[in-house]
């Protein structure tokens, strides 16, 4: 049977490729018609032993499709009813010719929103290394060796005493060490923690650091800046509140909450009924940090903040597992 099939295939192809319009109609009936040779072979499939049935059926169907394509191609060549006299270049191509077009990752979308807000307020966006020295990642930020504050961040230590940065805060030091105030920067980028992964922890994620230093900077300026940022990402109705907290590099230190965009602050499952969502840390730059970068704390004050775009993306797009951001699963990422 398979020999028959291959023979019929070659014979039909040769006929079709050379046929004139009338010959083509004849060939189509003879091979592909209701009583055609190929159709008859397909009907005998049932007589084959079970093990041979599937491969033979598959091959016969392939042949059928190829012959149908050959008939269509020859019709076009002959200028028959299916010929293409002109092409509409504005028409979307058939699915099989369509190229998949990528789109922007949800975390990158949130980062773009954040960057646009800060660009509109005159901030500069800076980039920095993910492999850091102990000085930039810890000591200059007033976190001495052996200090318990180091326990706040589980760290990947590298050979030679360097670390994978655990936060973007070292960018405050890097920038302020060789720029004079007024300073207005944000530093987005990847950070690393030696964490076990689960739905809300990942060994790598993004942060956006912010630093403002000037001669008359206040906590109110910090509040206004954070409010603009949260409204730019979570919507115009968002409110921000600051709660006392502790970070070694700020004094006073605060934790920033934003009103839950799902319920507008009345309380729902997303915000565990509180109406508020914890968004990041902030505070007025510690005088010792100013001195570490060569600035006089009597003359300059500043504020700093740090938060995670993954968290904003999770809230905004209703994503419940951070690991989904890193998995190469197009079907998931395509939704946003
Ligand atoms: N570095 C902190 C963290 O990773 C976030 C942070 C808190 C950044 C307070 C700041 C700040 O600049 O002032 O959790």
Image (cartoon, grey):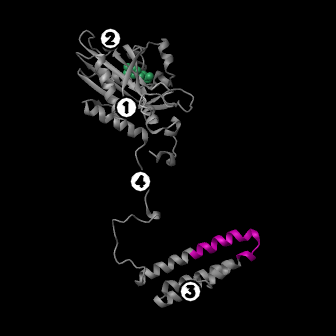
Judged from the image, the secondary structure of the residue bearing numbered disc 1 is strand
- Which secondary structure class fits the magenta region best? helix
Range of residues picked out in magenta: 45-64
- Where's ligand 1: which quadrant? top left
- Work out whether residue 112 or residue 160 is closer to the camera in this orientation and state it: 112
Residue 249 in picture, x, y percent from top left = 38, 15
Q: Residue 14's spot in the image, x, y percent?
A: 54, 84
Mark before the other along the chain sequence, 2 or 4: 4
Please tell me which of labels 3 and 1 falls first in the chain.
Answer: 3
Say the numbered circle drawn on residue 188.
Answer: 1
Q: Secondary structure at mark 4?
A: loop
Give the percent coordinates (x, y) of residue 91: 36, 66
Please give the residue where the numbered disc 2 appears in the rendered image: 287
SS for callout 2: helix
Q: Earlier in the sequence, mark 2 or mark 3?
A: 3
Identify the residue at image location x=50%, y=78%: 70
Residue 218: name its quadrant.
top left
Classed neighbour count for the residue bearing mark 3: other residues with Cα under 10 Å, few (<14), some (14–19), many (≥20) = some
The residue pinned by badge 4 equals 101
Q: Earlier in the sequence, mark 2 or mark 1?
A: 1
Above or below — where is 97 with respect to 272?
A: below
The alpha-carbon separation of the residues under discs 3 and 4 comes to: 42 Å
């Amino acid at each position: 049977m398979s020999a028959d099939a291959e023979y019929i295939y070659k014979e039909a192809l040769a006929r079709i490729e050379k046929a004139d319009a009338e010959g083509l109609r004849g060939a189509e009936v003879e091979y592909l018609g209701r009583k055609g040779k190929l159709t008859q072979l397909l009907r005998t499939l049932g007589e084959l032993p079970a093990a041979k049935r599937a491969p033979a059926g598959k091959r016969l169907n392939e042949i059928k499709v190829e012959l149908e394509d050959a008939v269509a191609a020859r019709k076009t060549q002959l200028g028959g009813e299916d010929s293409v006299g002109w092409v509409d270049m504005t028409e979307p191509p058939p699915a099989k010719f369509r190229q998949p077009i990528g789109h922007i990752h949800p975390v990158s979308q949130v980062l773009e929103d954040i960057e646009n807000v800060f660009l509109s307020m005159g901030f500069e966006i800076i980039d920095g290394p993910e492999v850091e020295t102990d000085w930039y990642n810890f000591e200059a930020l007033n976190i001495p060796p052996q200090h318990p504050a180091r326990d706040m961040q589980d760290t990947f230590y590298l050979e030679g005493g360097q670390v994978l940065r655990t936060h973007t805060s070292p960018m405050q030091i890097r920038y302020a060490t060789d720029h004079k105030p007024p300073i207005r920067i944000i530093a987005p980028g990847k950070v690393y923690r030696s964490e076990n992964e689960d739905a809300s922890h990942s060994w790598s994620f993004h942060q956006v650091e912010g630093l403002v230093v000037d001669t008359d900077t206040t906590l109110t300026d910090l509040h206004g800046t954070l409010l603009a940022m949260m409204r730019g990402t979570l919507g115009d109705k968002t409110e921000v509140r600051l709660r006392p907290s502790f970070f070694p590099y700020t004094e006073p230190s605060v934790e920033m909450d934003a009103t839950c965009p799902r319920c507008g602050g009345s309380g729902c499952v997303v915000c565990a009924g509180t109406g508020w969502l914890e968004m990041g840390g902030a505070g007025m730059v510690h005088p010792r940090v100013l001195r570490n970068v060569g600035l006089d704390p009597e003359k300059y004050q500043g504020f700093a903040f740090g938060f995670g775009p993954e968290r904003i993306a999770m809230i905004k797009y209703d994503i419940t597992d951070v690991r989904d951001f890193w998995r190469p699963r197009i079907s998931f990422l395509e939704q946003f």
